[in-house]
Amino acid sequence: MVVEIPDTTLAGSMDKVEIFEIDDFKVYVIGKEDLIVDRLKDDCRWVYDKIDWKYLKDRCMKEGTVNELIKIKTEVEEILNEVRGSTGREEKEDMD
């Protein structure tokens, strides 16, 4: 089990915290949305560019979720272009 305790205060919403019970212990986990924001806040383009899209596509093909991946990838690209001020020259990762 890996546990990350980055700070003493929650950088996000307590309303999004999820509680899991494991045996007699309660585990409080930051909300998925806040976790995404935390991981992306420094430089979302860097994170996007470091994703192994071929591996992700192959894994989604095995799980039957490739259409969802393509939809999410397209939406993320649109948001990044909007946020970064797209120059019209989009960098596309080859998922084939």
Image: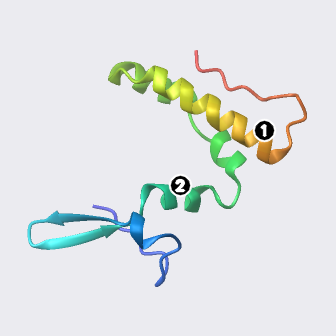
Query: Around disc 2, counting alpha carbons within 10 Å, would you say few (fewer than 14), some (14 to 19), or many (20 or more)?
Result: few
Q: Looking at the image, which residue is at 16% across and 65% down?
A: 21
Say what secondary structure mark 2 lies in.
helix
The answer for how far apart the CA atoms under marks 1 and 2 are is 18 Å
Q: Quadrant of residue 32?
A: bottom left
Tell me which label, 1 or 2, sits earlier in the chain: 2
Q: Looking at the image, which residue is at 42% across and 61% down?
A: 31
Q: Identity of the amino acid at label 2?
A: Ile
Is residue 9 depicted above or below 30 in this figure?
Answer: below
Image quadrant containing the C terminus: top right
Is residue 72 depicted above or below 12 in this figure?
Answer: above
Horizontal and vertical percent position of residue 47: 63, 47
Q: Identity of the amino acid at label 1?
A: Asn
Q: As drawn, is 22 to the left or to the right of 72?
A: left
Q: Looking at the image, which residue is at 81% across and 46% down?
A: 84
Query: Around disc 1, counting alpha carbons within 10 Å, would you say few (fewer than 14), some (14 to 19), or many (20 or more)?
Result: some
Horizontal and vertical percent position of residue 58: 45, 22
Is residue 21 depicted above or below 89 in this figure?
Answer: below
Image quadrant containing the N terminus: bottom left
Which residue is situated farthest in the front direction here? Answer: 15
- According to the picture, the residue beneath numbered tag 2 turns out to be 36
- According to the picture, the residue beneath numbered tag 1 turns out to be 81
Q: Looking at the image, which residue is at 45% across and 21% down?
A: 66
What is the number of the mark on residue 60? none
Q: As drawn, is 70 to the left or to the right of 88?
A: left
Q: Quadrant of residue 85?
A: top right
